[in-house]
Image (tube, helix red, strand yellow):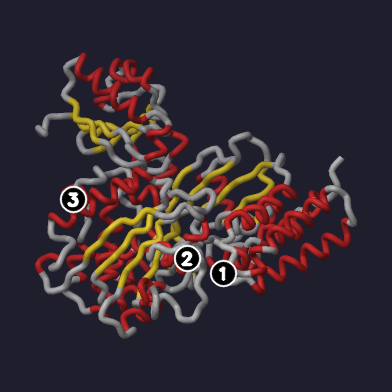
Amino acid sequence: MASNLIKVFVPSDTTARSLGADAVAAAIEAAAAERAAAVEIVRNGSRGLYWLEPMVEVDVDGVRHAYGPVSPNDVGSLFDAAFLDGKPHELALGATEQIPFLSRQDRLTCARLGVIDPLSIDDYRAHDGYQGLSRAVELSGREIVDAVTESGLRGRGGAAFPTGIKWNTVLGAAGDQKYVVCNADEGDSGTFVDRMIMESDPYVLIEGMTIAGLAVGATQGYVYIRAEYPQAIKTMRQAIEHARSAGFLGEKILGGKRGFELEVREAAGAYICGEETSLLESLEGKRGMVRYRPPLPAIKGLFGAPTVVNNVVSLSSVPIILAKGASFYKDFGVGRSRGTLTVQLAGNIKQGGLVEIAFGHSLRELLEDFGGGTATGRPMRAVQSGGPLGAYVHPSQFDTALDYEAFAGIGAMVGHGGIVVFDDTVDMAQQARFAMEFCALESCGKCTPCRIGAVRGVEVIDKITNGENADDNLALLRDLCDTMVSGSLCALGGMAPFPVLSVMNHYSEDLKARN
């Protein structure tokens, strides 16, 4: 494109498209043609300010100005107001980077989301992409693993297991073939950052997986993407082809002696396949069922070979660690929670979207300063953090720091960073019932505490709300939760009681007979 064209950015992210971004892009293209305006429309990803989508940006002398939310009917008035020159309009948000929701963040992993053309390797490299891999090819596997270990990176998928320890186990495991598997089966309620990364900055995940392969001696990787993400699947497959053509994948990475190949596999559509061993079973073409452990996947994983299994955010955080050093990444965060957390604000929230900040900020800061309170304007009554298996956090606990250990201290979990907000109209007994019902529906059926316990949990909660022997059934429900926590084979049955217990501990007034 000629340099005198004015760049107009219209997001192609799934959420933005569902809100009309494609129609907005078409309207801008038609209006520009009608007015003979020299415009280049760039379909970037979303920056994650979802309450403002579709958010259109215009590059004016190197500074991007935002307008939103824009509908096709707004396009004419935007042109009339000279938005191509960054002029005021009722939808004007000012310089994009100065929007408070963005300017207060620490975007490391998600730095390029909404900034670049997702499939342009030139764009990716112009914004510091592939610097980490360029350094990694000069290092030994041991040196890469040591850097990741020193950074303090922990798994961002839920368990928060130290990434360096997992990689070190695979590095030291015997085997002619090793694998790197990305768990992109993002199924927790209120989560969308994995999808955003794959749709808006796919090369950062490809780069992170390639570095992981070089670190542990793996030559093959798989991205296991949930079937409900067709755009992410398409974008990742296209990006992999582009990366291979450019020499960033294949037999000789960047002309070196080590190789790494990558392909996308579509998930089986079951929540349980987000559990790493069930995911591996599914990848092998089997029914998604949890494996007994030991052996761990790091020793005997995919097809019986040593396997790294990490989620999208974990792997996408690796390139900046290699590019800028372990100390740079470790300087963000507190205690044992280092680096940044990608929080996704959802539910009854005024300003829903993606927030990436260093560990240590309070939950209240996220809900009020970033989220702006509830969408209804009513008081918050509960927040569920960590997906459908996460405990409900009471307003008295909102000053807890976003930190793995701090959240564990109040019986909650950070998990994948999904935060779902409820106002004071919520029926917490029904939320407790849903946790058990969800577990019953999604159980793989392999272990009795999960398979039977969840069904009995629904029945007991129904008896309580129907007024049947309330005291005895409340005691029975607590005993049932303890059995599931202690006896379940995996986290599905072991954690489904957490939301139920939190309701019993903090919202017991809702566990009573209904009129």
Foreground disc of the pair 2, 3: 2
Q: Earlier in the sequence, mark 3 or mark 1?
A: 3
Is 186 located above or below residue 118 in the figure?
below
Image coords of residue 69 (percent x, y):
42, 29
Is 96 or 202 nearer to us in this picture? Answer: 202
Q: Which mark is residue 490?
A: 1
Question: In which quarter of the view is residue 504 placed?
Answer: bottom right
Residue underneath mark 3: 121
Is 42 or 285 nearer to us in this picture? Answer: 285
Q: Name the kind of residue labelled 3 in the image.
A: Ile
Secondary structure of the residue carrying tag 3 is: helix
Q: Which mark is residue 113?
A: none
Q: Earlier in the sequence, mark 2 or mark 1?
A: 2
Q: Residues within 10 Å of mark 1 (few under 14, many from 20)?
A: many
Image coords of residue 451 (percent x, y):
64, 63
Question: In which quarter of the view is residue 136 placed?
Answer: bottom left
Residue underneath mark 2: 278
Q: CA distance from mark 2 to mark 3?
A: 34 Å
Is 489 located above or below residue 511 in the figure?
below
Image coords of residue 262 (percent x, y):
25, 61
Secondary structure of the residue carrying tag 2 is: helix
Locate residue 263 relative to residue 312 in the image: left or right.
left
Question: In which quarter of the view is residue 251 placed?
Answer: bottom left
- Rendered residue at 40%/46% (across/down): 229
Whether residues under marks 2 and 1 lie with C-beta atoms below 8 angstroms apart, the answer is yes
Q: Name the kind of residue labelled 2 in the image.
A: Ser
Q: Quadrant of the C terminus?
A: top right
Q: Residues within 10 Å of mark 3 (few under 14, many from 20)?
A: many
